[in-house]
Amino acid sequence: MKILFVFAHPEPRSLNGALHDVAIKELEALGHEVRVSDLYADGWKSEIDRADFPTLAPDARLKPAAASGEAFAGNSLTADVKAEQEKLLWADMLILQFPLWWFAMPAILKGWVDRVYAYGFAYGVGEHSETRWGDRYGEGTLAGKRAMLLVTAGGWEEHYSDRGINGPIDDLLFPINHGILYYPGYDVLPPFVAYRVDRLDEAGFAAVAERLRERMRTLGSTPPIPYRRQNGGDYLIPSMRLRPELGEPDAAGFALHLNGAGAAGQPMQNQNPPASDRTRYSV
Ligand code: FAD
């Protein structure tokens, strides 16, 4: 496989840096081809501003989505953004690696998404009609490829469990997994999360590293999170609400978007996991 890491930690000698090396060594030993976008080392510019749209008239009002679409269509996006898009098209598998900062990704990585995911590339793709709402959520430019998060967190695993005070980790990561990765088409693998890492000793590091090696060995065979496909018939158009007959009657929130039976009661490609697994995908 061709694998792209987007790495977001400012210190190569960090735990994240060490786990990055572990993962790449394992993947290369398995014969995979690996490329890395090291955002801090590369001095990645994280904010969208006028400099992103060199052909925009100086007196024109900046509308980021419209400017993005025009620049993508006119091939006038900046060279750094085009290079990242080329890497995304090259890779069969994308791994976003970051420490959890304020229950989210570091700003530099969010800025990578904001700038690289141009209109026409990652959103604004496909036709709208009575039966389709564009190519997104399982369809789109990056369909057929896999993606996964590699995350470290200071908090305990229990704090991120179903009744944990931080909220379930799969809920916290849903906007990234579903909103950023599934949206442009990726099949999203369960995230790799290392918890309680701030005082990790050598034995703890060895255990995390081995767990990570195992995940790297199974990247091609791990089943993706069974999100429902937008255009598979499960959602009403144009409200984009899940059909009332689907999902548990009282269910609400993120777990509703995990696949169950199809609109006509027919099983779809990915079946619901057992109820006990349904709210937990991180491993
Ligand atoms: P490092 O600090 O580099 O390392 C952590 C420990 O790992 C070290 O002390 C060491 O014991 C061990 N280690 C490192 N490298 C090795 C090695 N090669 N071999 C053996 N042991 C090693 N946590 C949350 O859970 N939720 C949050 O919302 C959250 N918000 C944060 C916001 C900010 C701004 C910051 C700075 C931290 C936050 N944290 C949060 C904690 C953060 O997630 C962790 O500090 C981070 O994940 C640790 O990763 P690191 O690579 O920076 O670790």
Image (cartoon, helix red, strand yellow):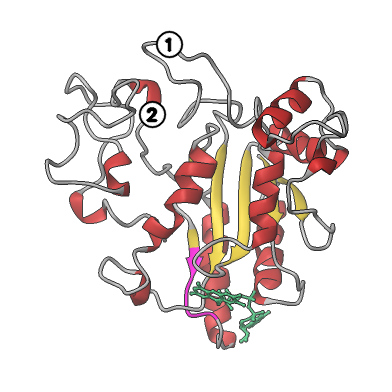
Q: Nearer the viewer, mark 2 or mark 1?
A: 1
Q: Please, what is the three-letter code of the amino acid marked with disc 1?
A: Ser
Q: Is 244 rendered above or below residue 163?
A: above
Residue at x 21% of width, y 48% of height? 274
Q: Quadrant of residue 283?
A: bottom left
Residue at x 18% of width, y 46% of height? 251
Q: Position of residue 8 (x, y in %)?
A: 69, 61
Residue at x 75% of width, y 26% of height? 72
Q: Is residue 108 visible?
A: yes
Q: Is 208 rendered above or below residue 57?
A: below
N-terminal-most mark, 2 or 1: 1
Q: Which residues are magenta?
A: 193-197
Q: Is residue 258 visible?
A: no
Cα distance between the residues tagged 2 and 1: 16 Å
Identify the element where label 1 is drawn.
loop
Q: Position of residue 98 (x, y in %)?
A: 62, 63
Horizontal arrangement in the rendering, residue 48 relative to residue 107 (left or right): right
Q: Position of residue 102 (x, y in %)?
A: 53, 70
Disc 2 target residue: 229
Q: Main secondary structure of the magenta part?
A: loop
In front of the other: 32 or 131 = 131
Disc 1 target residue: 129
